[in-house]
Amino acid sequence: MGVQEGLNKLGADLMVIPLDPYSRNAGFFMTGTPSALYFNESVTNDVLAVHGVLVASPQAYAGTLLSVPWCQYSVHIMGFDPTTDFTIKGLVTSPMPNSLGPYDAIVGSYVQGGIGSLINIHGQNFSIAGRMSSTGFSTDYSVFVTIQEAYTLAAGSPPGPDPFPLHQGQISAILVKVDRAVGINPVLYWITELNPGVLVYPMSALTRQVGDQLAVTTQTLYMTVTSVILVSLPLVALIATMGTSERRREIGLLRAMGATQSYVFRLFFSETVLLAFLGGTVGVIGASLGLVFFQDALSSSLNIAFVWPSIIVVLSQVSIALAVAIALAGGAAIWPAFRASRLEPYDAIRRGQN
């Protein structure tokens, strides 16, 4: 769901990148590891001339800054064409000037600094003209400048650990919006046929690709949770049984005072369910705090941006977790609660004294 929401924010139907038979890179937006493969900027006009293409906007990966004081991650420097762009400006959450100046930049959500503050890229100060909303992709720790500024930065980048590989007239990707009346698949075919040396990705396929990768992780987590449930069920039943045995005297006194079997059953059953609810609540709060404190470490280790899902998704997952905890404890407490309710007063008091 989060992947699809991020792609919807980008607004592109197709992504055109250089063909590399030895690479499985699915594009800058998805992997966060852009390739230094380029094609000539004239390909943009060739793509735009294809029947069914409404807009074609080029982007150029200039290079990566491995360490800067204004972002805790490695920062990708990207060039884009503001006159044809339909993705980057759509992600900007703050008011933007009508046109970008020569030293204006649009930054991702992980880049520090307010609107109008300066960031230094290889000795050149750029003013933050806009900030993009979080997408969960590498745009969150990227800086977008005009494509001409990207060429200038690359030409003047000093030798060192992070040189800029871009050269004048090169681009690394073209984002395409398609006329839906024509269809995405026909346009994809025509672009591929008319432009040898390019690879065209439908954004929906990228969703499936990343979704398949996440599905493996999700299945592993589900298997782990299932194993924990199978182990926990007898343990909860054992703890409930031990609690019942230790409170035989109390049960006998309750029965002697007129408590019915159903009352004793409800008493022990509801106690177990309440403890499960409180324990589940503490677990959910602890897990949430863990994500808050360690989200940066997770993002850094996985090389992806961490995006919190919507409040509706969070509440639904919390509800499911609590429901599973209550059902698990309730199922495990049925037999101990039933045994407690069947104890006779005299027998329960006598055994409770031993």
Image (cartoon, helix red, strand yellow):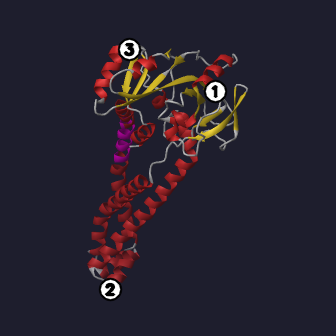
Three-letter code, disc 2: Ala
* Mark 1 residue type: Leu
Residue located at (41% from left, 17% from top):
46
* Residue 195's disc number: 3
Q: How many marks?
A: 3
| Residue hosting label 1 | 65
**Secondary structure type for disc 2:** helix
Query: What stretch of residues is rendered in magenta?
Result: 215-226
Badge 2 crowding class, 10 Å Cα cut-off, few under 14, some 14 to 19, many 20 or more, is some
The quarter in which the N terminus is drawn is top left
- Residue sticking out furthest to the right: 123
Q: Residue at left 34%, top 17%?
A: 192
Q: Residue furthest bottom?
A: 257
Which secondary structure class fits the magenta region best? helix
- Give the percent coordinates (x, y) of residue 239: 39, 61
| Front one among 304 and 218 | 304
* Amino acid marked by disc 3: Asn
